Structures are given as C-alpha cells and as structure tokens.
Amino acid sequence: MKVAILTGGGDCPGLNAVIRAVVRRGEQHGFDFIGIREGWRGLLENNHFRLTREAISGILHLGGTILGTSRTNPFKKEGGPQRVMQTLQENDIDAVVAIGGEDTLGVAKKLYDMGVKVVGCPKTIDNDLSGTDYTFGFDTAVSIATEAVDRLHTTAEAHNRVIVCEVMGRHAGHIALHSGMAGGADVILIPERPIVIDQVCQHVRTRLARGKRFSIVVVAEGAQLEKGKDQVQSQDLDEFGHVRLGGIGNYLAKEIEKRTGVETRATVLGHIQRGGSPTARDRVLGTRYGVFAADLVRDGRWGQMAALHGDAIVAISLEEATRALHLVDPKLYEVAEVFFG
Ligand code: F6P
C-alpha cells in the first residue's frame, strides 16, 4: 500500500515525531510512504517526495515539520478537490494520513466523504479539538509560555510594573489558563469569559494594597473585551475564514496603566510558542498517535482519527473531532480564580 503523509495548518512541536512514528510503524505493515509538501497545497500542486527510512531518521527531537506546512484549503480553490483526487490517482496513492487541527482535519473529513481513504492525527498547540483530551504540541507551548511568565515575574518585580503577557490559543483559553496557573499569574483572561477591565484593575489595586507593587496578567489572544467595547484585532481572514488574532495585550496594558497609574508593559509571545523542540510528553504523545494512525490505515478504518481519552489512545471519527471546539472547563478556571489579585 502506498500511503501519503501531510502536515497542515500552523506548525507544532511534535509533528516530526508523528511523521517518524507513522513511517516506522507503517514499514512494519509493508507500506511505502510519500511525503506531501506543505499540506493540502502539495496535493493541489502534485508536490511530494519519497519518504524513506533515511528521510525520517534523526527528526524525533526537532520542531517544525520536515514536510513543510501551509493553511491551504483545496475547497476554496477552483477545481481544488478534483486536483487533489487527480494527484492521488496519478501517483497511485492508496491512503492519506492527515496531521493537523480543525481546518486540516475538516478538509480530510470532506475528502473522506468524497471517497478518499484518509485517517487523521490531532495537532495543535491550542488544544481546541473536540473528541480528544489533548493534542500534541500543547504541552510544549504551555512549557514555553510558563517559562516566559516566570521570567516576566522577575523583571516585573524589579521595576514595580504590571506586565501583560499575550499568548496564543485562538478561541480557546487552554494555553493562557495552564501557563497562567503554572506561572502564578495574578489575573488570567480567556476567550471563554468576557474581559471586565475594571475587575482586572481591581486585582492590581488589591495587590498594591498588600504591598505587591507588581502584577502579571496572562491574556489569551482571542479574549474578548466586555460587551459594548470594540474588539482589538485585524480584519484579515485566512482561507479557512479565521481572523488573525493579536493586539489585546497591548490594548490592555494601556488601559491598566491609564486606570491604575501603575507602569504597565505588554509582551506578545507569538510564534515563539510554536518553535523549537517538543517536550518529552509531546514526543511520546506524538509517537503514540503516529503508531496508532498507521494501525488505522492497516485496518482500513477510514475517516477515523487517533485521540487521547484518559491515558488510552482510541479511534474517533473525523466528524466528531471537527464538530465543535474544545473549550476551557469552567471548573478549572474557578480553581485559577482563587489566586487572582
Ligand atoms: O492554531 C495555532 C495558532 O498558533 C494559533 O494559536 C494562532 O492564532 C495561529 O495559529 C497563528 O497563525 P499564523 O502562524 O498563521 O500566524
């Protein structure tokens, strides 16, 4: 069987661990592998290479993806799905392993509905895919953001400043909540709860009254201002219709300084959260997902995705994986709130 592997959407630590695992396990099943370059774009443009054992050697610990990636949506291109089918046929590709988040897997689901033999692997630092407890890449992003919060603490304390740290996560607050809790942030703001700036300032003032002249605020890039206020973000849309988020950290810093009189700065972590080596946890999780995905192909379980339930890797349908966003559990946020102010 000839199996194509592709990685789509934002890059994510652990992608190479998954690619390596799919190939190593697949070789045991007698598969040949094709690496598709730059996500779905590679299938539109017939751009790929033979994914040999040699090609996947020494990549377990590396960030990024040896296949390259893009946010290409073939369903937004003229004749896109047909071109994808043609590439598969011309190259005698029997099955596709799609490694990605809701967008990439949404395309995989549509192609599966059109008869393509596809299985999925859940990737995203945002951890916002439903049907799986954790996606790989999340643990690394949280570790990086936590280290940043630790470092911001020391400089905030030295200067008696408020520092607002803006983290990624799109419309889910998992990265903000976990890094904020782990780093001991004084306020954590997530998209699931509208921001009330007066409350944020009140926490800063409460700390001042206790003699704490610095505060750390962690804000998710997708956090929304309280009702009636304009959202601070660009209007640019990608091929999947997502706006480019960012800007809330700087906006908040100005407001906090204006309202409390405490010098306030913003730090935007941005793509630093996606770069570099995956944590041990993400390498192991990615490896487990990859081995499982190769077994799904062996068993002909098309339209399925590897998922983590508790500590078990199980199969769920791509439909379930892309049905809704996995958002922050309000009970976990309540635990974090105990430490605000
Ligand atoms: O989905 C992963 C993610 O890193 C989001 O957290 C973020 O909003 C987005 O991708 C950034 O995308 P880009 O790399 O296209 O700027």
Image (cartoon, helix red, strand yellow):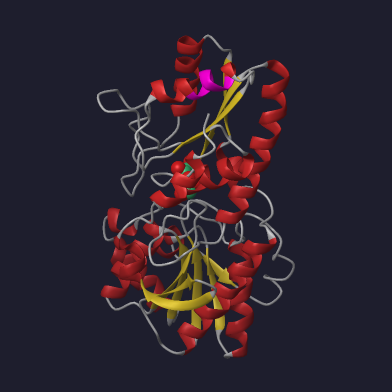
Q: Quadrant of residue 114?
A: bottom left
| 254 over 5 or under it: above or below | above
Q: Is residue 205 magenta?
A: yes
Q: Position of residue 97 (x, y in %)?
A: 47, 73
Q: Which residues are magenta?
A: 203-207
Q: Nearer the viewer, residue 22 or 75?
A: 22
The reply to whether residue 52 is visible in this rendering is yes
Q: Position of residue 245 (x, y in %)?
A: 41, 36
Q: Nearer the viewer, residue 20 or 153?
A: 153
Question: Furthest-front residue in view?
Answer: 210
The reply to whether residue 12 is visible in this rendering is no
* Image point (61%, 72%), residue name: 287
Q: Position of residue 201 (x, y in %)?
A: 46, 20
| 292 over 131 or under it: above or below | below
Report the number of numbered marks.
0
Q: In the drawing, does residue 282 fall left or right of residue 332?
A: right
Q: Nearer the viewer, residue 280 or 114?
A: 280
* Image point (73%, 20%), residue name: 158
Q: Is residue 326 magenta?
A: no
Q: In the drawing, does residue 9 fall left or right of residue 30?
A: left
Q: In the drawing, does residue 26 fall left or right of residue 132?
A: right
Q: Quadrant of residue 115?
A: bottom left
Q: In the drawing, does residue 171 fall left or right of residue 26?
A: left
Q: Nearer the viewer, residue 299 or 58?
A: 299
* Image point (48%, 88%), residue name: 298
| 71 over 84 or under it: above or below | above
**Magenta segment, prevailing SS (helix, strand or loop):** helix
Q: Position of residue 15 (x, y in %)?
A: 58, 62
